[in-house]
Amino acid sequence: MNASIDDSYRLLAAKHVRGRARQLAAQLDGIRKAEEIECVHQARVASRRLRAAMRMFRDCFKARRIKRWRRHIRRVTAELGDARDKDVQIEFLCGVLDRVAEKACYPGIARLMVRLERQRERLQAKVIRAVDRLQRGGALDEMQAVSKRVVSESKARGVGVQSAVSYAQTEQHILQRLNRLLPYQDSLADPKAKKRHHAMRIAAKRLRYTVEIAKPVYAGRLKPTVEVVKKLQSLLGEVHDCDVWMDQLPVYARKERRRIVKRFGHAGPFARLQPGFEYLEQERRECRERAFGELVEYWRQLEHDGVWDDLVSIIGLPAEQSDASVICT
């Protein structure tokens, strides 16, 4: 643990780590039962936020301890990610089947949903192993115990999360995340720049997590920023989801065609499935165009409103009023 990090910043770290660790732990039984896909979603989000916190607060905990925590959380995040992706795709296809009017599209969409459901079933065993490994490793219990001790000691001494160091440290982290997001804005001029749009989504997600972590230090002044970045991340996420579908659908179709040829000796039966695949490709292409247009317009509005300049002003004000001699950067 770094002695140059003051008690207020350490308290901010402990509160966030404790909250996210408890959130993740609360979902583990539900993940095992696989009765509600929301458990996987909530656990995945909690694990990602824990990883963000451990990057941001790595100096607030012992180096060996934080390294072990990060290793355990990284593993479970990966396993939950694969399962969550399949859950989202299956849920999407259920919605498509409910609203599609062309009956000729049903067989192909239903076949794809069956394939994804089988893949998800196979993933469940890996998910359970990841959850069991996480619990056996004791990382979550240790996170909660260590952070609870810090919170209790801080409360006894009347320590809060606001201090010159907290302002300086959170300002530094937010600026780093913002400066990694802004260079991607030129990709919005090119609808085909998929890789950069994906990188922009990740940068927006990381900015959001960092701002959410820092929010208690700024007494509610960052709440509008959280909402702004949340919507930005959502729009970028919708664009990315469409890109993933558009990349994967031709692959799914080719695999299904090969299965049919292997079974029947010819591709004739695939004609019954093809309308469904074509419908999905067209629907995802149109959705992508709409989402990207909304994203571009939203970004223009943010620039017009000076949202990023306002964020820099908000996080810079406390530091300007603080005693520079106690600021740790």
Image (cartoon, rainbow, N blue to C red):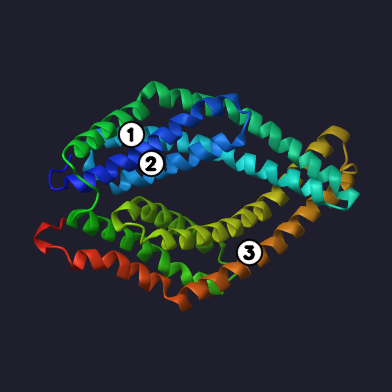
Mark 2 surroundings: few (<14), some (14-19) or many (≥20) residues within 10 A: many
The three-letter amino acid code for the residue at tag 2 is: Leu
Instruction: Please name the residue that numbered disc 3 is placed on.
Output: 291
Q: Position of residue 6 (x, y in %)?
A: 16, 47
Tell me which label, 1 or 2, sits earlier in the chain.
2
Cα separation, mark 3 vs mark 2, equals 29 Å
Cα separation, mark 3 vs mark 1, equals 37 Å
Instruction: Please name the residue that numbered disc 2 is placed on.
Output: 50
Q: Position of residue 327 (x, y in %)?
A: 15, 58
Q: Quadrant of residue 234?
A: bottom right
Tell me which label, 3 or 2, sits earlier in the chain.
2
Tell me, yes or no, if residue 257 can be seen here.
Answer: no
Instruction: Looking at this view, name the residue that lies furthest to the top.
Output: 136
Q: Position of residue 311 (x, y in %)?
A: 36, 67
Q: Is residue 316 left or right of residue 236?
A: left
Looking at the image, residue 25 lies above or below residue 186:
above
Looking at the image, residue 111 lies above or below residue 248:
above
Marks 1/2 in contact by CB < 8 Å: the verdict is yes
The three-letter amino acid code for the residue at tag 1 is: Trp
Q: Residue at x 87, y 36 (%)?
A: 265
Determine which of the numbered discs, if any, sits on residue 69 in the image. Answer: 1
